[in-house]
Amino acid sequence: MRELLINEQIRDREVRLIGDDGTQYGIISIQEARQIADEKGMDLCKVNEARDNNPATCKLMDYGKYRYDQMKKEKEAKKNQKVVEIKEIRLSAVIDIGDMTRLASQTQKFIAEGNKVKASIRLKGRQQAHPEIAVDIVKQYIELVGACAVVEKQPMQEGRNIFAVLAPAPVKK
């Protein structure tokens, strides 16, 4: 949450003042604005900086209540957001179909929870001479996972590793 300048922290000579109920006071000196704020028992808060011959905009408000409401909104927004994790499934260049189906079902569980899945194979020794075999294994694995996931990144080689990223399929309405 960004902090606003209030009352004596405001150093501008003239400000455009907006009342707590939205009334426009116009451009007035900072002393007048502070006097109006004191009379109403409110805080003078600087909501916009001065730009292009326009003075800064200040508003009359109860700053404590404003901060409380802002913090409440932030907590609510934080509570409602979903953190997407990237789970990693490690395959092998010599994996058998039984292990691949087990890993595919595990991937379906991760996708159902709303997480992304990174399927990777690390090539060892002579396997590096034939990376196309490992790419075919990743493609078979993607077919086993099925329609619950979409391929976000196609299988690609990066050094000794081959990986693909799967994401949850968009929900149809």
Image: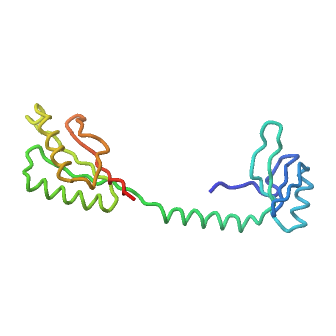
Residue 43, percent from left and from top: 80, 62
Q: How many marks?
A: 0
Is 45 drawn above or below residue 69 in the view shown?
Answer: above
User: Which quadrant of the rendered structure holds the C terminus?
Assistant: bottom left
Q: Is residue 5 left or right of residue 89?
A: right
Is 77 drawn above or below residue 125 in the view shown?
Answer: below
Is 49 drawn above or below residue 23 in the view shown?
Answer: above
The answer to which of 132 and 169 lies nearer the viewer is 169
Residue 7, percent from left and from top: 81, 58
Residue 60, located in which quarter of the rendered image?
Answer: bottom right
Protein image colouring? rainbow
Residue 26, percent from left and from top: 89, 51
Query: Which residue appears at 13% of the width and 46% of the height?
Result: 92
Outermost top residue? 129
Q: Is residue 61 left or right of residue 76?
A: right
User: Which quadrant of the rendered structure holds the N terminus?
Assistant: bottom right
The answer to which of 158 and 22 lies nearer the viewer is 22
Outermost front residue? 173
Residue 139, located in which quarter of the rendered image?
Answer: top left
Query: Which residue appears at 23% of the width and 48% of the height?
Result: 119
Residue 20, located in which quarter of the rendered image?
Answer: bottom right
Query: Which residue appears at 75% of the width and 54% of the height?
Result: 5
Residue 121, percent from left and from top: 18, 44
Query: Which residue appears at 14% of the width and 40% of the height?
Result: 136
